[in-house]
Amino acid sequence: MKKVTVLAAAIAFFGVTSFSANAQSTQANTQQTQTAQSQDSNREKISKDQLPAAVQETLKAEAYQAWEVKDVYKVKPAEGSAETAKATYEIQFTNSEDQQAFARFNEDGTVITGE
């Protein structure tokens, strides 16, 4: 009888633990989705010709010669951010081997991030 009681308690414990982990996971996913949606509302798809001249000059560098610009997005600063915050530009690239790359530039053509 003791074994049955211990087994039932273990099953109940793992069931509650699993339910709690599921609830936390769902909450985290909801927060990530909301963050992504707010970031998407600040993104505007633009053409390569609409990039600032400094970013266009940076793209002429040897490091980008093997890459073709696929998509370009202008990302506006989030509402409530500092008045000095400026737009950034996200660029997705592909090369002749169908590899993908991503880079983010500020208005003066400096690379902020790249993958």
Image: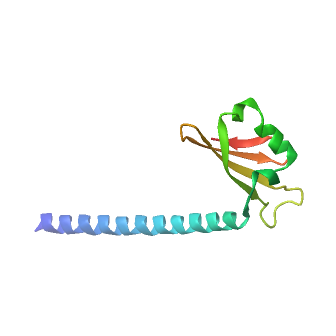
The x and y percentages for residue 85 are: 85, 56
* Vertical placement of residue 12 versus 95, above or below: below
**In the depicted structure, whether residue 45 falls above or below residue 53:** below
Residue farthest along the left direction in this orientation: 1
In the image as oriented, which residue stretches furthest toward the top? Answer: 62
Q: Left of 27 or right of it: where is 91?
A: right
Q: How is the image coloured?
A: rainbow
* Residue 107, horizontal then vertical, whole percent: 84, 48
Asked which quadrant contains residue 114, the reply is top right
Question: Outermost residue toward the right?
Answer: 84
Of the 4 image quadrants, the one containing the C terminus is top right
Give the residue drawn at x 17%, y 68%: 5
Query: Is 5 positioned to the left or the right of 101 in the image?
Result: left
Instruction: Give percent across and percent down for residue 11.
Output: 24, 66
The N terminus appears in which quarter of the rendering?
A: bottom left
**Does residue 43 lie above or below 49 as drawn?**
below
Q: Nearer the viewer, residue 1 or 47?
A: 47
Q: Residue at x 82, y 62 (%)?
A: 81
Residue 103 in view in this figure: yes
* Residue in view at x 57 percent, y 37 percent: 96
- Residue 108 visible in rendering: no
The count of marks equals 0
Q: Is residue 70 above or below residue 8?
A: above
Say which quarter of the image contains residue 65. top right
Of residues 97 and 34, the one drawn nearer to the viewer in this rendering: 97
Splitting the image into 4 quarters, where does residue 23 fall?
bottom left
Residue 53 image point, x, y percent: 86, 45
